[in-house]
Amino acid sequence: MEDVIIIGGGVVGSLIARELSFYEISVLLLEKEEDIPMGSTKANSAIVHAGYDPLPGTLKAKTNVEGNRLYKDLCEKLKVPFKRIGAYVLAFNDDELKTLLELKERGKTNGVSEIQILKREEILKREPNINEEVKYALFFPTSGITNPFLLTIHALENAIENGAKVKLREEVIGIEKKDMGYKVITNKSEYYCKYIINCAGINADKIIHLLDPDYPFTITPRKGEYLILDKKAQNFVKSTIFHVPTQKGKGVLVTPTVDGNILLGPTAENIEDREDKSTSHEGLSEVKEKVKKLTPNAPFNLVINIFSGIRASSTYKDFFVQEIPEFKNILHFAGIDSPGLTSAPSLAKMAVEWLKEKENIKRKKNIKDFEKIISFKELTEEEKENLIKEDPRWGHIICRCEHVSEMEVRNAINSPLPARTLEAIKKRTRAGMGRCQGAFCSYHIMKILSEELEIPMNMITLRGGKSFLLNGENKVRWKYAKRS
Amino acid sequence: MQKEVDIVIIGGGPAGLSASISSAEKGKSILILERNEELGGVLNQCIHPGFGLIYFKEELTGPEYAYRFIKEIEKYPNIEVWLETMVVDITNEKEITAINKDGIWEIKTKAIIFSTGCRERTRGNLQIPGTRPAGIYTAGTAQRLVNIEGYLPGEKILILGSGDIGLIMARRLKWEGAEVIGVIEKLPYPGGLTRNLVQCLEDYNIPLYLKHTVVEILGKDRVEGVYIAPVDDYGNPIMDNKRFIECDTLLLSVGLIPENDLLENINIPLDPRTQGPYVDQYLSTLKEGIFSCGNSLLVNDLVDYVTLQGILAGKSAVRYINNEINIEKRAHIEIDGNLRLVVPQYLSYPILEDITFYFRVKEPQKSAILTLKDNDKRIKEWRFPVVKPAEMIVIKVKPEFLRDMENPKFSMEG
């Protein structure tokens, strides 16, 4: 019997798991995929928003501003890159200026500090690649960027270090009310618990409907397509550049990433199929057109990758964070679309407060800090030398583009939340994320995965399931194990 | 840790190997830095024959070709080879930072030869929309998997791009029992050498679809198929005529990009046409003491030319160290007409020896005339029955034709 079961290992679920792991309770997180994060947290703009956009009084507004304040400290603790690079919202005409002024007021009401309004000359002086036709801009110095993969993975690893349990490849297919609490049924097993926290992201409504099929809450998935530019475009913009927002969201942005690339996107397309993470000609062209409006000289010849993500938007206008009638002790975090990443640290605190109201939970005396070397290339020369002396494999650089060492890859596999796929390695180390997109390092990493996990090469997948990287069984048969 | 040598060669493929030998002959101390676990570069995975017809006057496989140089290097005690060594930084003062299993190295040197080769263009570069399943490989990665690691990437394979590696992989995968559905080429003419079209596609009845491209990739976990569509004369896909092709693997053979990231870090200017540095006839970049050769200088179609460039870069580095290169003035070479690129792009005066020029054309052309001019004055002509973008044009010009030029220009006309 667990005290708390968390469903879903996105940024919200993982940060909640970490917060709860600091208390004298048992916590189990269930994730249906091979790794975390795999849903909305995996593919978004990675912006820590200042908080000017959500309507005052909403949970979005409150948690956005609070979440933004919590980020610096949280990222330091979890060794995740976070940079307050600031964000511009551009206006090209007087109508848009009106919206800017409204946003400024809204920002103030929401508690955003240091909002600046800038004129053309000042904007172009600071960001020479912005469209010269710009008239005004709001500048939000507190807006930031982060790495959502590392934030989520490190949060959950820190939770595991503090006693939380994680089960991957377990999809919740049923929840039954019992005398003592609930029975949670997965595709593999059954678990009993007193409390459930639903952080199932894009599928959070499915969890709600397992309890009450008629409950009026539906996720309306909204896809966003993106392009990533090579690090050669690094200084193209220094801050995040937005256009004034519309009904559909904050629109297409141009932003640096914490790793030195430039990210362009997203589109906002309502879709039927929640699993549809495909990109399209139309979507990518739309991004480019809108980017040209913001920054006409965007170097599209430096595109190294394209992807899309799905926002867990819902029929409910705000974040849906509540229990539903007749199913007490289950807290739902549903409809967590933008600014979900920013709000996540604040939402995690809400989960703790909710539990504290129900139960007298005690904070652990010895809470373990997260202590892992994250990036070899960012160490000092002396630190690098010492590591190589300890184990020469630190000096073997596997990923040429991102300078990732063999030991970083091995450590990613031998960690509290082991990387078991090529993509899991990529999320943790950046190996394969550079300009060659893994053309040189993939087979090295596949070999290391095979060796460390003691599985044959033809069982190695891109991201779990049946995404096998080698699909032939007719060559050197003896090397292969039967997959079935 | 510290290290000091006369010449550092970055990259131990065919260009770096020949550069090391030609510079070691003069007694200089040479250090080759190689990222991989063995010398030879991409030749190690090119197990097909066809190498060395020009340089050795015989037909060798890639590993055989490389082995001849690797064996030769062993004769020179003044050549040191560091494998699994990654150069991470370089300064304008020719100080190199490298990492290997022994530690972090600060290497001081008098001359650097870049022979870093190419990387392959990827799906992201092409921005092919669709899903992101497993089973999308660059042709070179697939070649490594099959020829060195011993694994087949998939069983039902479509190849995008008719570059030489793609053509060779079509035949190779067929031999290994995979079904090769065809090769798709966006241009109206093939990208690879004629001999590869005949020996790799025609002999095995593998169809080549010219003026077609892949417009969408399908499949959730593994590639399940792609949509291909014909393209119009401007290269835009005609989506109304798109059709589905079932496959479990998409190989990309859509071009090579010279790897010159380190040169860019120290602001050595690159030629946008070759994507390699601007060089003169010594294969010296515009920063003295830094030389470039092989596929990082320009994408070659025959390894023999790579070897010759390596030899030249090695000799030039020695002459530079010995103060034997005295440049009085430099002239930029222009190109015109059907010419897409030229190497070298500069002439450094005085010119003392024959100069080998490498060209590529934009489009196929019959009975083409290559003209050398100075200020529009015709100096010399070369005639070719046919020229193709896939086949490099190589000519040797005597110093007397290049004397005291002001505005040298090559043009290719009909």
Image (cartoon, grey):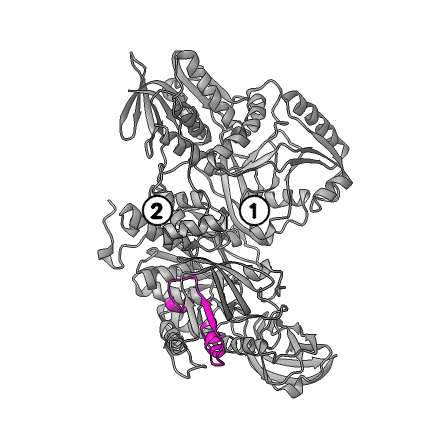
Residue toward you, A178 or B254: A178
Residue A179: quadrant of the picture: top left
Alpha-carbon neighbours of circle 2 within 10 Å: few (<14), some, or many (≥20)? Answer: many
Closer-to-camera residue (B92/B340): B92
**B133 on left or right of B371:** left
Q: Could you tell me which residue is drawn at 49 percent across and 81 percent down?
A: B26
Identity, as a three-letter code, of the amino acid under mark 1: Gly
Image quarter (top left, top right, bottom left or bottom right) of the N terminus of chain A: top left
Please state if A114 lies on the left or on the right of B216 as rendered.
right
Q: Which residue is mark 1?
A: A260
Q: Residue at x 62, y 81 (%)?
A: B369
Q: Chain of mark 1?
A: A
Image quadrant containing the C terminus of chain A: top left
**Residue A461 visible in the displayed image:** yes
Give the label on residue A174, or none.
none
Q: Quadrant of residue B17?
A: bottom left
Q: Position of residue B170 (x, y in %)?
A: 38, 64
| Residue annotated with mark 2 | A461
Give me the chain letter of mark 2: A
The mark nearer the N terminus, 2 or 1, is 1
State whether residue B350 is above or below residue A429.
Answer: below
For the residues bearing labels 2 and 1, Cβ distance under 8 angstroms: no
Q: Looking at the image, which is closer to me, A358 or B321?
A: B321
- Magenta range: B17-44
Q: Amino acid at mark 2?
A: Thr
Instruction: Work out whether B332 lies above or below B129.
Output: below
As for residue A206 lying within the magenta part, the answer is no
Towards the viewer: B31 or B299: B31
Mark 1 crowd level (few <14, some 14–19, many ≥20, 10 Å Cα): some
Q: Secondary structure at mark 1?
A: loop
Same-chain check, marks 2 and 1? yes
Q: Nearer the viewer, mark 2 or mark 1?
A: 1
